[in-house]
Image (cartoon, rainbow, N blue to C red):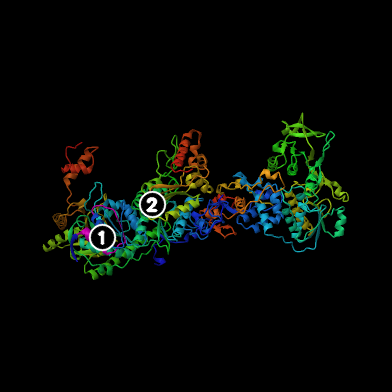
């Protein structure tokens, strides 16, 4: 059924169709509308046999998920940014205990400076946490991928995190096709836990493992994620069979196979890129896009294959490893190391800065001229940076960087000088 | 869900820790022990007091009676007349007051009489033993020897059996129907008691009767007497004779003002008898101060309650007419350095009396042994060795006639020991007493666990009523009180299955074997922490070093 | 003397108090009605925590955990799921490849056990399972410090969880550091009595049972491993309530306290008898009952068996001893212990 609703509501409705049994939540922008809406669905009786718990922190929220999942319940929660960091210990624990929890991450920057807007810093902060991390480009995909996420999590007995860009998707009201309960039930069977706290068949879950077996435990976790590569593809096909839509999967190529220059990116920015690439291709340029939909497991082979004919890959990321650079760029470099592929890393959209088609066009045009550096910060205010760097050089006690920059930009009163 | 699908290493199956044998950590090993409770150790009759108290706790009175009478055939008697040294040794005395063992013994004895429980003789051995004297030692020995299966004949000079039980202990302390009933029970085992049968020639009787062994239990029947200065215008009687005459209902000589000389239990018995026979005024003259009189405290107290006056630190100097002169004594300040404890002051006082009774001890009558020169006496008693054999082979001696504590209870113990010695001797062996376990001293226990339970007091007859007759002074415990009193026993040194060790072992290293079977350690898992030992209320666990 | 015959038809709490040698102070009593004996006295007890665990000799926590869980197992007809905080109890029971738990058990993290248990309870609620009950357990560090947020949240939501804190007064698993439940003056690795310092400061610390009461949850109790009947009664009582419940069990730690392993029960008893460990119950935030001290003892008798208090008994530190005595006095008054 077609509906004109926000991304958050779409996700909440989709999650409800998956019949979660336990939903603990803690509010944090920009995911709050999702859990608010689930609360209403539970209270109104639309979502039955579900315990909704309004808890005291994200750490508790994920911990409740751990307990509920270990007790054999289908479990869901959502968070973002600082909230993810606050639950971090439990995030690692959930995957370590092999619990098939599904969580939405409404992607948002991490402070300080505190910033509520979108980028991928939060997602990247848990890239080693052992979760499956999926990215969605649109609200329809967000809705669809959540349905797949439960099935995937339960098939693997691993937690799955669906990354959707904060505000850009969560708050955007778009038209989505909401599947019926029958369709979802057909796709997603009832949860049969791989391990369960059961008084009839007691187990001890969460043993201490020493050097004698820790390596094997970690290797098996890695192995399981690699197994997930084929399962994600199979489930995307199965999904398409029932729902008639291409959602999910490991990667999505837009002209990438026959393009000289390819944007590689994750999330909603793909939409902007698609518009640009359509224009450029009409202008006769050999450009394409490769959307990474599964970041963990990282589909290295699929990416390598997709970029086999590409001359220059521009890896666009909404986060980076400070002191090192683009995370995705590094990983794609590893994936394509056998190819003669030029790679540039473009960092943009940090803390919610708008990514304009115009800026992206500049990037691709300089790539066409072979003038694109290997590391580029999109729309970086060079003068601000230079001024601050000079100030730091000149003064021992130059004050907080962020405030200085805002003062330079006239956001904070210039009277407060030192 | 199948086993192989559980996450590797993180999720574990129950019961897997049993593979980890933590017993290897141990340097000390707990073991269950039986320690000797102080009551049992102290009992002159060698009763398993704790054992029968435990059965009484469970209200299994017949089993309690059977266990008690294994050592002492006279619970109804001894429950009345025993001076219960066990209670003095009882560890509970260090917590509140000793267990009223004697009162429970009496209760069990009464149960035996009420239900007419009987003894069984042992399988006939064909051996015959003659016993001289049907007093407590002789009857005790007869009983034990019958249980061994020997034929027993007891020769008694008096007209009734019982010896000092009958002729030395007044009725108000030991009603005669109780005495008779418990003696009959021994006779019913097949013990022959020949009354009015004084043995003049031991050897001849032995030969003519075809006896294999002899046991002499003639007691100490000869009262010590003192000659006083003066003309002694009043009768001077001996205590034993007074008590015997009372028993035989001979004409009463305790008339008017009665003075009893002596500080022992016999003196009290005479004084109390005199009151009951209507004496006008009764005084007990004791050389000692109240704390050092040999009579038991309760006897002295009851004597005073009944109206007698106890005059301490006096000796009789002379008796002239009705006037008795007393020397006032004092406790010597030098008595710690080996001098006499009590010495005269040289000051005198007089009292008036119509009759004087001497209660200053008894001894064996040496005339009895004039025809048996091989039986030697030493310090007025028959000389015996460690197995109670006299200097003549095959002749044994027990009770007051042999060196002893001179109490009914020790006489019973003597009888038992002599019976065992004779039994071994008849079999060509030498009696070896079983080795004793380590004593269960109070410091080996954890008294916190015992419930607060003040001692039950047996009902006592009002003093007014006691003066008018020979009714029994001390009453029975009722069943509830008897149970309560039995349950005050702390079971010192012997497991009473409180489950403490089983419950408090942090390693579940103790197996409970079921009621009556106790526990066993699972040394595979016991880490040797010692908590079971520390928290065993009764001290029935010991920690011993491992060989490592 | 009320010393009447036991009557098996009468429930334990209504039976006439009677004297059976040790009454109900020992674990068992062969003369008590079977139904009135402790769970630990029975050969059929669950042994929720079983042999082969790696707790130190004389571990009070190993004992307290088995006591509490076995009692809960009896109260629920063996329908218990337990969640465990990180700490000694977790480490010594579940080192791969061996678990010493015979009940369904999960360990997640140090600071989240209350929330994990809430999650289990939420799951049971969603499934409509009203017979299976949830216990969360941890040490005092995992409870009063790092796990306090989750615990308070669980109390706040009144989730149907019994939280049991095994209080040994410090972070023993990590090598005896101070927790907010470390008693004043106690020496720990982070509160050494150096110079004039008293060990753990007199002005610090928190008493979680009182905080739990402030949440007005249905049931709060304190217990001690020396008094098994009291402990089991409280656990069984806790299982009669729905909602959040909290029991704090005093568990001596030979390693952290510097005490003889054999004295664990004795110390547990002495702590109570000197007034430093008050045993009481509260319902909906109100004190309802307290376990009276049987034989009051001076606090120094208790302190002198523990090396962590050795400095307190030095002549120059009588002011510290006086301050500890005052704590005992205050407890006795506040909780009606005599």
Q: Which residues are magenta?
A: A6-31
Element marked by disc 2: loop
Counting from the top left corner in percent of width and height, residue C161 is at 38, 55
Q: Is residue A193 visible?
A: yes
Residue at image position (73%, 58%) is: B185
Give the vertical position of C334 relative to A4 (above or below): above
Name the subunit of mark 1.
Answer: A
Q: Are marks 1 and 2 on the same chain?
A: no
Counting from the top left corner in percent of width and height, residue B201 is at 87, 53
Q: Is residue B205 left or right of residue A276?
A: right
The residue most toward the left is A283
User: A317 or C191, which is in the foreground?
Assistant: C191
Residue A44, disc:
1
Residue C218, disc:
2
The residue most toward the bottom is A241
| Residue A315 falls in image quadrant | bottom left
Counting from the top left corner in percent of width and height, residue B239 is at 78, 43
């Amino acid at each position: 059924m077609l509906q004109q609703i926000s991304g958050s509501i779409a996700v909440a409705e989709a999650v409800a169709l998956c019949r979660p049994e336990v939903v603990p939540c803690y509010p944090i922008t920009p995911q709050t509308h999702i859990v608010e809406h689930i609360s209403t669905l539970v209270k109104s009786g639309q979502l039955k046999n579900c315990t909704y718990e309004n808890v005291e922190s994200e750490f508790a929220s994920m911990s409740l998920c751990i307990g509920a999942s270990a007790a054999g319940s289908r479990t869901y929660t959502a968070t973002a940014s600082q909230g993810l960091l606050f639950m971090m210990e439990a995030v690692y624990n959930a995957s370590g205990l092999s619990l098939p929890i599904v969580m939405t991450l409404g992607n948002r920057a991490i402070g300080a400076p505190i910033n509520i807007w979108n980028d991928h810093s939060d997602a990247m902060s848990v890239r080693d946490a052992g979760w499956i991390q999926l990215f969605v480009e649109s609200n329809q995909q967000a809705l669809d991928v959540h349905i797949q996420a439960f099935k995937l999590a339960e098939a693997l007995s691993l937690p799955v995190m669906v990354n959707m860009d904060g505000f850009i998707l969560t708050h955007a009201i778009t038209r989505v096709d909401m599947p019926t309960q029958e369709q979802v039930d057909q796709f997603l069977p009832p949860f049969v836990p791989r391990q369960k706290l059961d008084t009839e068949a007691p187990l001890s879950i969460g043993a201490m493992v020493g050097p004698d077996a820790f390596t094997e435990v970690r290797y098996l976790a890695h192995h399981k994620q690699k197994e997930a590569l084929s399962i994600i593809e199979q489930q995307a096909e199965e999904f398409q069979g029932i729902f008639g839509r291409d959602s999910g999967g490991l990667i999505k190529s837009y002209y990438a196979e026959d393009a000289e220059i390819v944007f590689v990116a994750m999330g909603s920015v793909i939409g902007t890129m698609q518009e640009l690439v359509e224009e450029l291709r009409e202008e006769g340029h050999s450009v394409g896009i490769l959307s990474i939909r599964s970041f963990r497991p990282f589909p290295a082979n699929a990416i390598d294959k997709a970029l086999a004919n590409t001359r220059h890959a521009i890896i666009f990321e909404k986060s980076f490893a400070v002191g090192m650079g683009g995370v995705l760029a590094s990983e794609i470099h590893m994936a394509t190391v056998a190819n003669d592929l030029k790679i540039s890393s473009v960092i943009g959209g940090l803390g919610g800065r708008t990514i304009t088609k115009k800026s992206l066009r500049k990037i691709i045009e300089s790539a066409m001229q072979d003038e694109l550096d290997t590391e580029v910060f999109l729309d970086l205010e060079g003068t601000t940076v230079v001024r601050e760097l000079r100030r730091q050089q000149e003064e021992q006690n130059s004050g907080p960087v962020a405030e200085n920059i805002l003062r330079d930009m006239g956001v904070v009163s210039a009277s407060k000088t030192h | 869900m199948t086993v192989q699908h559980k996450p590797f290493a993180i999720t574990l199956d129950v019961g897997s820790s049993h593979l980890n044998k933590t017993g290897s950590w141990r340097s000390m090993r707990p073991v269950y022990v039986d320690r000797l409770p102080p009551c049992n150790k102290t009992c002159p009759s060698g009763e398993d007091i704790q054992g029968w108290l435990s059965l009484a706790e469970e209200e299994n009175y017949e089993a309690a009676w059977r266990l008690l009478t294994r050592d002492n055939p006279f619970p109804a008697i001894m429950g009345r007349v025993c001076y219960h040294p066990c209670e003095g040794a009882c560890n509970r005395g260090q917590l509140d007051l000793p267990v009223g063992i004697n009162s429970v013994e009496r209760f069990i004895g009464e149960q035996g009489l009420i239900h007419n429980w009987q003894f069984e003789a042992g399988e006939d051995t064909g051996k015959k033993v003659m016993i001289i004297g049907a007093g407590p030692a002789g009857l005790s020995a007869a009983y034990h020897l019958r249980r061994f299966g020997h034929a027993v004949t007891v020769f008694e000079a008096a007209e009734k059996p019982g010896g000092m039980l009958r002729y030395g202990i007044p009725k108000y302390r030991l009603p005669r129907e109780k005495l008779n009933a418990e003696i009959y029970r021994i006779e019913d085992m097949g013990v022959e008691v020949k009354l009015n049968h004084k043995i003049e020639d031991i050897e001849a009787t032995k030969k003519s009767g075809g006896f294999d062994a002899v046991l002499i239990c003639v007691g100490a029947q000869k009262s010590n007497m003192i000659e006083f200065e003066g003309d002694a215008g009043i009768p001077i009687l001996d205590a034993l004779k007074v008590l015997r005459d009372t028993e035989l209902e001979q004409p009463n000589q305790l008339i008017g003002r009665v003075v009893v000389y002596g500080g022992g239990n016999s003196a009290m018995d005479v004084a109390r008898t005199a009151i009951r026979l209507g004496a006008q005024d009764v005084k007990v003259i004791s050389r000692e101060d109240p704390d050092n009189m040999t009579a038991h405290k309760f006897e002295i107290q009851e004597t005073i309650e009944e109206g007698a006056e106890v005059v301490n630190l006096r000796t009789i100097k002379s008796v002239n007419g009705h006037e008795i002169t007393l020397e006032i004594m004092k406790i010597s300040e030098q008595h710690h350095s080996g001098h006499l404890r009590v010495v005269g002051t040289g000051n005198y006082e007089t009292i008036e009396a119509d009759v004087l009774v001497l209660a200053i001890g008894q001894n064996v009558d040496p005339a009895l042994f004039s025809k048996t020169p091989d039986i030697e006496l030493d310090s007025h008693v028959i000389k015996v060795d460690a197995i109670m054999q006299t200097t003549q082979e095959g002749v044994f001696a027990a009770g007051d006639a042999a060196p002893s504590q001179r109490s009914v209870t020790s006489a019973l113990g003597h009888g038992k020991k002599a019976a065992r010695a004779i039994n071994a001797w008849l079999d060509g062996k030498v009696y070896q007493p079983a080795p004793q376990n380590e004593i269960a001293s109070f410091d080996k226990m954890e008294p916190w666990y015992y419930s607060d339970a003040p001692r039950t007091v047996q009902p006592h007859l009002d003093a007014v009523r006691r003066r008018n007759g020979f009714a029994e002074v001390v009453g029975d415990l009722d069943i509830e009180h008897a149970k309560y009193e039995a349950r005050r026993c702390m079971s010192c040194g012997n497991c009473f299955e409180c489950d403490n060790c089983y419950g408090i072992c942090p390693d579940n290293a103790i197996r409970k074997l079921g009621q009556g079977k106790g526990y066993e350690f699972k040394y595979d898992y016991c880490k040797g922490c010692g908590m079971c030992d520390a928290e065993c209320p009764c001290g029935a666990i010991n920690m011993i070093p491992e060989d490592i | 003397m009320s010393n009447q015959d036991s009557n098996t038809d009468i429930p334990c709490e209504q039976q006439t108090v009677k004297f059976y040698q040790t009454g109900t102070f020992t674990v068992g009593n062969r003369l008590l009605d079977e139904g009135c004996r402790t769970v630990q006295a029975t050969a059929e007890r669950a042994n929720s925590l079983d042999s082969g665990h790696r707790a130190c000799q004389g571990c009070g926590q190993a004992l307290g955990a088995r006591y509490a869980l076995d009692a809960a197992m009896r109260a629920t007809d063996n329908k218990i799921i337990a969640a465990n905080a990180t700490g000694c109890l977790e480490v010594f029971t579940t080192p791969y490849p061996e678990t010493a738990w015979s009940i369904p058990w999960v360990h997640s993290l140090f600071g989240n056990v209350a929330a994990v248990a809430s999650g289990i309870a939420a799951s049971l609620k969603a499934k409509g399972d009203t017979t299976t009950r949830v216990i969360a357990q941890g040490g005092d560090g995992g409870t009063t410090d790092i796990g306090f947020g989750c615990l308070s949240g669980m109390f706040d939501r009144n989730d149907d969880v019994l939280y049991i804190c095994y209080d040994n007064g410090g972070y023993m698993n990590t090598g005896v550091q101070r927790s907010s439940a470390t008693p004043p003056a106690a020496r720990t690795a982070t509160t050494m009595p150096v110079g004039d310092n008293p060990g753990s400061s007199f002005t610090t610390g928190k008493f979680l049972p009182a905080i739990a009461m402030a949440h007005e949850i249905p049931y709060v109790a304190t217990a001690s491993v020396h008094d098994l009947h009291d402990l089991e009664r409280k656990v069984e009582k806790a299982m009669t309530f729905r909602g959040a419940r909290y029991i704090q069990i005093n568990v001596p730690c030979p390693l952290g306290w510097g005490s003889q392993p054999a004295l664990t029960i004795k110390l547990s008893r002495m702590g109570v008898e000197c007034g430093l460990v008050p045993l009481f119950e509260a319902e909906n935030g109100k004190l309802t009952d307290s376990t009276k001290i049987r034989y009051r003892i001076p606090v120094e008798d208790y302190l002198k068996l523990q090396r962590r208090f050795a400095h307190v008994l030095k002549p120059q530190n009588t002011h510290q001893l006086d301050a500890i005595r005052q704590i005992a006095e205050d407890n006795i008054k506040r909780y009606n212990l005599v």
